[in-house]
Image (tube, rainbow, N blue to C red):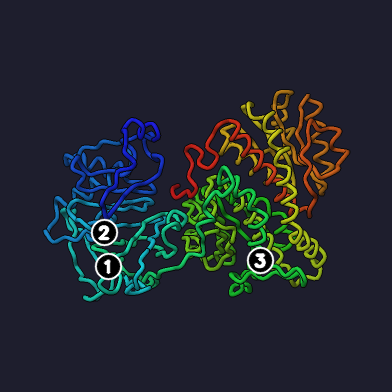
Amino acid sequence: MKFIVKQKFLNFDKVFDAHFGIAHTRWATNGVPNEVNSHPQRSDERNEFVVVHNGIITNYKELRKCLESKGYKFESETDTEVIPKLTKCMYDNRESEAVRFSTLVESVVQQLEGAFAIVFKSLHFPCEAVAARRESPLLIGVCSKYKLSTDQIPIVYQTYKNTNNGRTSKTHQTETENFKCLHPIGEEKAIEFYFASDASAIIEHTNKVIFLEDDDVAAVANGCLSIHRIERSVSDLTSRAIHTLQMDLHQIMKGNFSTFMQKEIFEQPESVVNTLRGRVNFETSTVKLGGLKDHLKDIKRCRRLLLIGCGTSYHSAVATRQVLEELTEMPVMVELASDFLDRSTPVFRDDVCFFISQSGETADTLMALQYCKGHGALTIGITNMVGSSISRETDCGIHLNAGPEIGVASTKAYTSQFISLIMFGLMMSQDRISMKQRRKEIIAGLQTLPNLIKEVLALDKNIQLLAHELFQHKSLLVMGRGYHYATCLEGALKIKEITYMHSEGILAGELKHGPLALIDERMPIIMIVMRDPCYIKCQNAVQQIVARQGRPIILCAKNDEEIRKSAYQTIEIPQSVDCLQGILSIIALQLLSFHLAVLRGYDVDFPRNLAKSVTVE
């Protein structure tokens, strides 16, 4: 993109008088990232219809073949290009000259399969723009200095049916002739609308947003916003509310840090406090999760807990499975959302299913949510975004309160997910006398956690020196067991994501079942050996590695003289309660992955081929 901009000799000082702008920052889901495959995609050389699209059209091959047979020529390799060409095809074959832009888009959307958030613009409909969504997040920011006509935008319902020739015909007029749209009151008509997938993209301009639901079509015409749906179901709300975001601009700025990821790593003492605030009473050793209180009796009667997520969110579930089993005395299943769906996993009415997602929009997790709801299970969302799809569609939930996370590689959201699940276990065991001492121990650990995190962050310079030794290697192994197996998986993922080094998290108990063949003096190895129930077993794994000329770099507790003797190098971190130690260990690995990426010259915040919110399968 930078190369293209340089080649075009663009004048960035030029001022345009325009009422509308359309753009999209993305990589190409279909086709290589280049100028032709970038957005907006167009219907023809005259740009009669242009669109930007976030998501994936799964039936694009069939649509493309049909459109090509009708003479429409394609320029790109993208799935998105079928949308503007299909829109033009339907416009060219319209039954009435008085067709509305929103009506046209409704007809187009009916032909699309997959996940999408789309914004349409057309030469034929000046001063208008239309947006639609399905299984991909889309919100509208509203900015005006003047009083607005309403804070609840009524939905306009229209029903269309397909005729034999593929055209659409209206069979039902709008529900109300004088429906209200959103607009400023009075003579002054100044108002701005922002279409975005994430609130952090528009918070610089406004904190007033409308969250669109699946199959909503939003139309802006001459400064008025209306929301349309093709059909109405019994459970549908009849309006969309304007929400006020509790987010400040300074939260999405880098401040004194070089990257967002670095800032977010160093924000963890505060984000942990925010996750705990108002929920844990350290004086009485009690936990209260307001988002779950109405469903607590049903949760306590369940037969098992299912924790479902992807990537980092999945690892937070793995990290807390052991302590959840201990505190709740229930079977706990941890599932990758995509594999959970592929297996058509049996789900029962007396299951409680957790859906863990930083953005609340992860496509596979959302589909797993719909699957579990269809089987009658109680659903709980753990997200960092108020108003996200998962937070709206689950029965109840826990908001992380970690603050906006901009960097693609998740850091503070992981530790807040970790703590939220721990709090759930503590709440579930509140009435059990046998758990009283264990609960007090964990709650005391939570109270000291922010200060211990600060001690780990103070090791930044030492970890940077270690990164200088490792950054030229092509591979890196991370080993541990017990509570720290999830730390190994998450640490390896962070290194993969932003350094592009091969990295693998290995369960130390599996060392003799294959991974030991990789060990020699040239293979960098990080081991997590803390003073917990697996300490002796981890020591044995260290000895096996040293015996094969391995040089382990060991994350260990402070002043552990015994483990120092076997280590090539050590990173000594403060000791906490065994089930919370993974939070301190992962922060050390987050810092290591950050410094490795910087030394290798890569973009830490926006690694290649990845997106912050994974809204396609």
- Residue 568: quarter of image: top right
- Residue 466: quarter of image: top right
Badge 1 crowding class, 10 Å Cα cut-off, few under 14, some 14 to 19, many 20 or more, is: some
Please state which amino acid type lies under the numbered disc 2. Glu
Q: Nearer the viewer, residue 418 or 192?
A: 192
Local SS, label 2: helix
Residue 228 visible, this orientation: no
Vertical relation: 383 (above or below) 318: below
Q: Which residue is mark 1?
A: 189
Q: Which residue is mark 2?
A: 106
Local SS, label 3: loop
Q: Nearer the viewer, residue 454 or 551?
A: 454
* Numbered disc in front, either 3 or 1: 1
Vertical relation: 538 (above or below) 341: above
Please state which amino acid type lies under the numbered disc 1. Lys
Q: Which residue is mark 3?
A: 277
Q: CA distance from mark 3 to mark 1?
A: 42 Å
Q: Nearer the viewer, residue 288 or 253?
A: 253
